């Protein structure tokens, strides 16, 4: 899943079917020589016509799994739910083209101001901001959200990470050693000052910053029993200070959101109602043709191929922040220590072995044939696709398939075929096999992709079997990969990167989402360098991130498979749309105009 283009939210990344964090799209390319997809798309359209009153936008969410129903923009952990949550709230802070929060924007729900010398962020709530029940949005709500983020009893919180500990007193509060967060200072009902021990450039991308807020009364009620957290009104019937609020839910199937009658910018809203519904990949092409959805984001290659010649709408596309990858399990997450611990005796500890897994696979062929030329092979670590703009590493390259090199790497590392069956034994001459976790996403190419990997690895003598002998359901995959299930050695997944270029959330020593469980002193030093005050200098920032990109590519805790084109479908009854305007915050979801009461077929 990928975040939609209407929203500007911050954070580092999301693991598909594991965790979602917001992002914004960008067509900025850091290099004229950057790789790109074979298929190119237009980025705007104007169908003309006049808007009709009262029409409801039908917003499709492409997913093989149902909406789980955690309607919380801060703590929900499924991509499907977050499509709804972020559209309803609409984004608290505006951002620039690089995805950094805009300072002193008086029209935002909360105005952001950074004082680097004082190491303070001042948050000022818009005078007109109110919850959907008519009550004022106040400083109490901001404080309550931060306290929930750091609540030591909220042990299942996947959002909390050490970046929040740059706020004075947060570490002590999270450890249960303080009753409140000393760095949160309430100036008045509309103003909160956050005092930081250190101000890093990544703060402007949302690191250590909550970017949507929750209602204090609902937080208090939900915090009474975290075993029942998911069922609390905070998550099932949340109040909203954004443009919409949820009015009706059909479990797992659809959600109706209507205009927040107390939204401070309601007079600017052209779109009053949105119906969200999941669309199964297998049915998506027909759903598009039938006019059952007006907007569908994250269109996959198979869906596009099945509907690319339609006459009742338009496909727009742009480079995205998506990266799919093949990950190696190299350790465990120690819950007591709260950190990743590398196992030097793990099955894939030898870097030569990991490199062989890379060189055995023809990524270009996969992206051109299986993904129909809509995806393309990444360079370097893959973590900085063209959409990140200026931080692209122009010197990074992409390894090509090289069977002989893969075989030599294995021979040199001592992995040889001792019994002549065509499959290599380990360094001690024992049988060697690997368990590969790959999801059934509902796309028609899922099995073909798995088969290509297994066949390619067998070609160089590596015996790889699918976990449990089959594709895994997204839920099973997510749970078992995160839990470091010992039956998983290799896994294929994806990240949708957010605007924040810092990857500590994915490769840091204390990061639960470091699913490879791999950490090095060099990585940690790079994170420190990226967070220094020097990084407010853009040239130094670029150099630091390019260096890190190279380090990760060399260590190979994973290897990138694909970068992607972000494709969206727009039904003909949507009057107009322009990706560039959306990227610059000049077009919001509520600016959409519908020119007919029903979708065109």
Image (cartoon, rainbow, N blue to C red):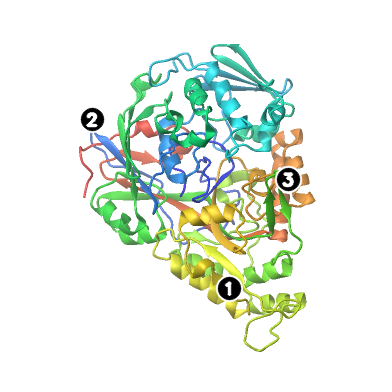
- Is residue 458 toward the left or the right of residue 128 in the image? right
Residue at the spot 30% in from the left edge and 57% down from the top edge: 283
Q: Position of residue 84 (x, y in %)?
A: 40, 38
Which element carries disc 3, helix, strand or loop? helix
Residue at the spot 29% in from the left edge and 46% down from the top edge: 293
Q: Are marks 1 and 2 in contact (CB under 8 Å)?
A: no
* Marked residue nearer the N-terminal end (1 or 2): 2
Q: Identify the residue under disc 1.
A: 464
Which element carries disc 2, helix, strand or loop? loop
Comparing labels 1 and 2, the label whose residue is closer to the camera: 1
Is residue 273 visible in this depiction of the protein? yes
- Is residue 49 toward the left or the right of residue 507 in the image? left
| Residue 351 quadrant | bottom right
Q: Which mark is residue 67?
A: none
Q: Which mark is residue 54?
A: 2
Q: Residue furthest bottom?
A: 420
Comparing labels 1 and 3, the label whose residue is closer to the camera: 1
Of residues 219 and 395, the one drawn nearer to the viewer in this rendering = 219
Which element carries disc 1, helix, strand or loop? strand
How far apart are the two marked residues, 1 and 2, measured between alpha carbons? 55 Å
How far apart are the two marked residues, 1 and 3, measured between alpha carbons? 37 Å
Comparing labels 3 and 2, the label whose residue is closer to the camera: 2
- Is residue 94 toward the left or the right of residue 514 in the image? left
| Residue 177 quadrant | top right
Q: Are marks 3 and 2 in contact (CB under 8 Å)?
A: no
Q: Which mark is residue 544?
A: 3
* Marked residue nearer the N-terminal end (3 or 2): 2
The answer to whether 586 is drawn above or below residue 194 in the figure is below
């Amino acid at each position: 899943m990928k975040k939609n283009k209407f929203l500007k939210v911050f954070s580092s990344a999301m693991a598909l079917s594991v965790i979602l964090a917001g992002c914004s799209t960008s067509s900025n390319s850091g290099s004229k020589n950057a790789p790109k997809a074979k298929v190119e798309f237009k980025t705007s359209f104007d169908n003309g016509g006049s808007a009709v009153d009262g029409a409801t936008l039908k917003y499709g969410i492409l997913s093989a799994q149902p909406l789980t129903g955690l309607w919380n923009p801060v703590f929900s952990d499924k991509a499907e739910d977050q499509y709804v949550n972020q559209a309803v709230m609409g984004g608290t802070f505006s951002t620039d083209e690089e995805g950094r929060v805009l300072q002193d924007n008086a029209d935002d729900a909360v105005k952001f101001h950074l004082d680097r010398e004082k190491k303070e962020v001042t948050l000022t709530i818009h005078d007109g901001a109110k919850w959907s029940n008519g009550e004022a949005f106040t400083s109490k709500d901001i404080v309550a959200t931060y306290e929930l983020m750091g609540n030591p009893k909220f042990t299942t919180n996947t959002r909390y990470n050490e970046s929040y500990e740059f706020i004075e007193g947060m570490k002590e509060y999270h450890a249960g050693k303080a009753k409140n967060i000393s760095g949160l200072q309430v100036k008045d009902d509309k103003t909160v000052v956050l005092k930081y021990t250190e101000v890093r450039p990544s703060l402007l991308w949302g690191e250590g910053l909550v970017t949507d807020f929750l209602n204090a009364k609902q937080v208090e009620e939900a915090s009474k029993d975290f075993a029942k957290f998911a069922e609390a009104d905070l998550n099932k019937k949340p109040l909203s200070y954004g443009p919409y609020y949820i009015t009706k839910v059909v479990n797992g199937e659809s959600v109706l959101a209507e205009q927040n009658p107390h939204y401070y910018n309601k007079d600017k809203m052209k779109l009053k109602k949105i119906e969200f519904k999941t669309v199964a990949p297998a049915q998506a092409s027909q759903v598009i043709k039938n006019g059952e959805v007006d907007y569908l984001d994250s269109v996959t290659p198979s869906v596009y191929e099945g509907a690319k010649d339609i006459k009742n709408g338009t496909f727009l596309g742009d480079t995205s922040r998506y990266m799919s990858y093949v990950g190696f399990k190299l350790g465990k997450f120690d819950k007591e220590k709260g950190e990743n611990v590398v196992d030097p005796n793990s099955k894939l500890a030898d870097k030569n072995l990991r490199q062989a897994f890379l060189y055995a696979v023809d990524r270009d062929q996969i992206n051109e044939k299986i993904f129909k030329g809509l995806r393309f092979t990444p360079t370097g670590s893959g973590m900085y696709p063209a959409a990140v703009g200026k931080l692209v590493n122009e010197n990074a390259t992409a390894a090509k398939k090289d069977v002989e090199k893969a075989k030599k790497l294995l021979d040199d590392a001592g992995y040889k075929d001792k019994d002549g069956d065509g499959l290599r034994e380990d360094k001690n001459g024992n049988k060697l096999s690997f368990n590969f976790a790959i999801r059934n996403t509902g796309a028609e190419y899922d099995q073909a992709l798995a088969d290509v990997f297994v066949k390619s690895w067998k070609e160089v003598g590596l015996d790889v079997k699918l976990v449990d002998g089959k594709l895994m359901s997204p839920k099973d995959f997510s749970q078992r990969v995160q839990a470091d299930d010992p039956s998983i050695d290799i896994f294929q997944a994806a990240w949708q990167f957010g605007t924040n270029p810092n990857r500590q959330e994915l490769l840091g020593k204390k990061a639960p989402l470091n699913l490879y469980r791999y950490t090095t002193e060099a990585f940690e030093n790079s994170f420190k360098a990226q967070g220094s005050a020097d990084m407010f200098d853009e040239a130094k920032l670029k150099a630091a991130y390019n260096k890190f990109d190279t380090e990760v590519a060399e260590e190979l805790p994973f290897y990138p498979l694909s970068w992607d084109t972000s494709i969206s479908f727009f039904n003909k009854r949507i009057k107009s749309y322009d990706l560039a305007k959306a990227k610059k915050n000049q077009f919001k979801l509520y600016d959409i105009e519908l020119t007919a009461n029903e979708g065109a077929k």
